[in-house]
Image (cartoon, rainbow, N blue to C red):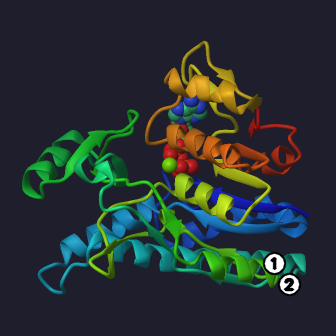
Amino acid sequence: MEKFVIAFGGNALLRNGDVPSFQSQYERAVEAFNGIWEILEDNSVVITHGNGPQVGNILLQNENSKNIVPSMPLHACGSMSMGLIGHIMSLAYDSVRLQQGYSKEPVVIITRTVVSDDDPAFSNPSKPIGPFYKKQEADSLMNDLKWSMKEDSGRGWRRLVPSPAPMDIMERNSIIRLLADGFQPIAVGGGGIPVVRRNGKFVGVDAVIDKDLASSLLASIIDAHSFMILTDVPFAYTNYGSKDQEKIGRIKLDEIQDLYSRGFFASGSMGPKIKAAMEFVRKGGKRSIITSIENSRKASMEQTGTIVLPN
Ligand code: ADP
Ligand code: MG
């Protein structure tokens, strides 16, 4: 029995070509929970997840109905995505646990992540969110709505928003208590809702916190043994996508820091995962694991996946 934080990537709910309907995301979530079921059974786990496509679609719905109802700010859209995904994931989890005859009740925590008002990210939007657009659509969105946008790994154009560093998790104590009391927490969705302390108040801000970095922070806060990032590739690779591509297996912190500094991991996708994995181990975590849902069980036994270990 070990304490884990498991961060689900976007592919736990949506894969390339999926229509982002409720039903298809629910079915993907059932697959995802079937994939990690044994880890949940054997350990004490906090589940976290991304929200990029979902919050992007909520923003789109807001944009298109702003003449009928006031549109909500990005941080409020983030909270909606957490509620939606929390609903999908807890339904899927409950269906899987019913079949497995297992008792741990899920609890979805609408999580707020504290960021600093002075974070340089606010003057440099860098986080891709929402759907992919064709170049022509992107041009008019940049022009009409003043969005920052960028081409993303050959998959199309996406909106860019500030991505400040997570400083603290406001619901840290509830998460710790729920875990200790035998619940199955689902928390820090989409990296949490970014809030800052300003003039004696807490306010929501329009930014997106990287879910891997926020999940890493949570893993350190709850003193987890293992931090596991589940995505759509079984390993992090050097020379990814080229004929010289090589998978990274078990690796020490200093060695992967060297590869990170040499630019092997794309910013906005594998880059933040490696950074999050390193941060957890640097702060005293036993290991960070990056792999696919399919390989998660074997990776939890260090038999596959990219495993970042202390020096
Ligand atoms: P998630 O939704 O799980 O956060 P991302 O798309 O953000 O997924 O990150 C996973 C993607 O990172 C992979 O699908 C892959 O295309 C990309 N990637 C970039 N660099 C690398 C690398 N060096 N090794 C493995 N994958 C990489
Ligand atoms: Mg990502």
Q: Is residue 215 above or below residue 169?
A: above
Q: Position of residue 39 (x, y in %)?
A: 84, 61
Residue identified by numbered label 2: 103
Q: Is residue 71 above or below residue 276?
A: below
Q: Residue at x 74, y 62 (%)?
A: 223
> What crowding class fits label 2: few (fewer than 14 Cα within 10 Å), some (14-19), or many (20 or more)?
few
Ligand 1 quarter of the rendering: top right
Which residue occupies the extreme left position in the image? 144
- Looking at the rendered image, the quarter that the N terminus falls into is bottom right
Residue 3 visible? The answer is yes
- Looking at the rendered image, the quarter that the C terminus falls into is top right
Q: Could you tell which of marks 2 and 1 lies nearer the N-terminus?
A: 1
Q: Are marks 2 and 1 in contact (CB under 8 Å)?
A: yes
Q: Please state the total of marks drawn on the protein image.
A: 2
Q: Position of residue 86 (x, y in %)?
A: 57, 77
Q: Residue at x 64, y 82 (%)?
A: 174
Q: Is residue 65 above or below residue 27?
A: below
Viewer-nearest residue: 206 or 167: 167
Q: Quadrant of residue 259?
A: top right
Residue identified by numbered label 1: 97
Q: Position of residue 166 (x, y in %)?
A: 47, 59
Q: Position of residue 62 (x, y in %)?
A: 25, 75
What amino acid type is highlighted by mark number 1? Arg
Q: Secondary structure at mark 1?
A: helix
Viewer-nearest residue: 166 or 28: 166
- Determine whether, in the image, residue 243 is placed left or right of residue 180: left
Residue 306 visible? The answer is no
Q: Residue at x 54, y 53 (%)?
A: 213
